[in-house]
Image (tube, grey):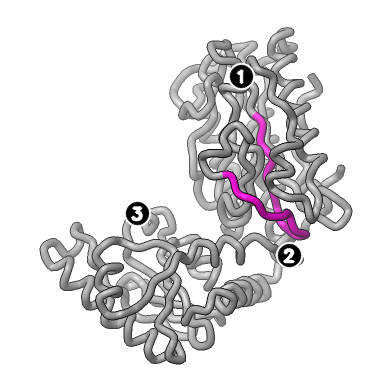
């Protein structure tokens, strides 16, 4: 499979914003709600195209949006930042946001939550067509309780947003392919620069820097490790020095150009060294898992079916398996997530893959108590003719 070309100058951002808002409203109609209240900055960005200090606002609830099913999109913005949405055709009105967080308003938190609920109840009454059912993607306790006291019925808005975000338009796919190729190009720079004596943190810094200079925004994780720190997985980057013959393994997890979550994993041996027999075995097992599971993907395949048919992890590596077999990707890790059958009790669900879903297929191979581990991950597009690579990012010839 070869990745198709993606040209950044062909990205139609206006079309992408309109398409995404339309997707949200289609799901709102299906859910029979007056609208949706969004707090998650990634969901706000998806529905409106607006962003403001995206990481900071993930843990400081200082901006939100109301998307009417049939009516306006109202963005409630942090004070002094209302100009950031200027020119966005998807936003009909920008208002000042209420804050109720204790750090900001102290003992007036319940009062401010009540003010928020009063305004939201009025917005729902004005634009809900008599429907008082509203979706909400997340919410702090005080404002949720206050809105419920005003006889607004709240339902979980996550299904609305996850299902809306799952299917990409052709223009959205162009933006995704461009951003992923940026990530692959950043990996290529790291591949040339990584050397014995370099700290893991320095190597990660190269990867992040090369993403940002290509229009990227920020990393969501710090998953780049070397040698014995590659096993078990999910250890965070430290100051350990890379040594010749070490395995370097990483998961990019970077927000790239256009807000796309660029999620690629690669592993290779540091220095001008051939892999040891053990490193080669680990790598080839990880490649086998990745290629088998990518080969399963097709439109109409069930999620449980993929789990059942997925590559059987050898017993020696099963306990250290990765968290999932595959997951959707767009502005973040998205629906669907494919569970290992061994983990079914923790939340496995069914559904079907559809055309124009983008899926990242995962592999981690490392034995319990083993010296090293290999992490690989590949993004693919689901088409009518099967899986298609999103970008060109070579593997090692081990």
Residue 140 falls left or right of residue 94 = left
Residue 70 falls left or right of residue 55 = right
Q: Counting other residues with Cα less than 10 Å from the Cα at mark 1, is it few (<14), some (14-19), or many (20 or more)?
A: many
Magenta residues: mostly which secondary structure? loop
Q: Does label 3 or label 1 sit earlier along the sequence? A: 3
Per the rendering, the mark at residue 366 is: 1
Look at 54% across and 19% down and name the residue there: 231
Image coordinates for residue 22, horizontal then vertical, percent: 62, 77
Q: Secondary structure at mark 3?
A: helix
Q: Is residue 134 magenta?
A: no
Q: Secondary structure at mark 1?
A: loop
Comparing 342 with 262, the one in front is 342
Look at 72% across and 67% down and name the residue there: 169
Comparing 67 with 394, the one in front is 67
Which residue position holds label 2? Answer: 9
Q: Determine the CA span between mark 1 and mark 2.
A: 41 Å
Q: Residue furthest left?
A: 107
Q: Viewer-nearest of labels 1 and 2?
A: 1
Q: Determine the CA span between mark 3 and mark 2.
A: 34 Å
Residue 33 falls left or right of residue 374 = left
Give the magenta part as a residue range: 348-363
Per the rendering, the mark at residue 59 is: 3
Rendered-image quadrant of the N terminus: top right
Q: Quadrant of residue 342?
A: top right
Q: Residue furthest front?
A: 345
């Amino acid at each position: 499979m070869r990745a198709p070309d993606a040209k950044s100058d062909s990205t139609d951002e206006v079309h992408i914003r309109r398409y995404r808002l339309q997707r949200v409203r289609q799901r709102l109609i299906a859910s029979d709600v007056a609208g949706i209240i969004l707090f998650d900055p990634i969901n706000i960005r998806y529905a409106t195209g607006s962003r403001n200090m995206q990481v900071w606002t993930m843990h400081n609830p200082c901006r939100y949006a109301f998307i009417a099913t049939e009516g306006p999109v109202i963005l409630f913005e942090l004070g002094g930042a209302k100009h950031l949405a200027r020119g966005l055709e998807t936003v009909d009105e920008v208002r000042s946001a209420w804050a109720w967080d204790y750090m900001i308003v102290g003992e007036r938190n319940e009062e401010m939550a009540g003010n928020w609920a009063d305004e939201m109840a009025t917005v729902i009454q004005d634009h809900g067509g008599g429907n008082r059912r509203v979706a909400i993607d997340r919410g702090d306790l005080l404002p949720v309780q206050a809105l419920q006291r005003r006889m607004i019925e709240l339902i979980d808005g996550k299904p609305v947003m996850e299902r809306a975000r799952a299917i990409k338009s052709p223009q959205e796919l162009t933006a995704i392919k461009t951003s992923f190729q940026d990530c692959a190009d950043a990996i290529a720079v790291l591949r040339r620069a990584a050397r014995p004596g370099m700290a893991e943190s320095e190597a990660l810094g190269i990867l992040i820097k090369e993403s940002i200079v290509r229009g990227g925004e920020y990393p969501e994780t710090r998953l780049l490790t070397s040698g014995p720190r590659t096993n078990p997985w999910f250890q965070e980057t430290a100051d350990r020095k890379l040594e010749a013959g070490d395995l370097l393994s990483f998961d990019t997890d970077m927000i790239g150009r256009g807000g796309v979550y660029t999620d690629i994993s690669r592993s290779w041996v540091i220095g001008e060294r051939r892999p040891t027999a053990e490193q080669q075995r680990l790598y080839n097992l990880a490649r086998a898992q990745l290629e088998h599971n990518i080969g399963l993907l097709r439109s109409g395949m069930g999620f449980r079916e993929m789990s059942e048919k997925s590559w059987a992890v050898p017993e020696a590596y099963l306990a250290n398996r990765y968290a999932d077999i595959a997951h959707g990707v767009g502005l973040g890790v998205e629906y669907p997530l494919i569970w290992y059958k061994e983990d079914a009790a923790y939340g496995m669900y069914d559904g079907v893959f559809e055309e124009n879903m983008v899926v990242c297929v995962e592999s981690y191979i490392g034995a319990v108590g083993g010296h090293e581990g290999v992490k690989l991950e590949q993004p693919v597009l689901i088409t009518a003719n099967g899986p298609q690579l999103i970008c060109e990012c070579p593997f090692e010839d081990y």
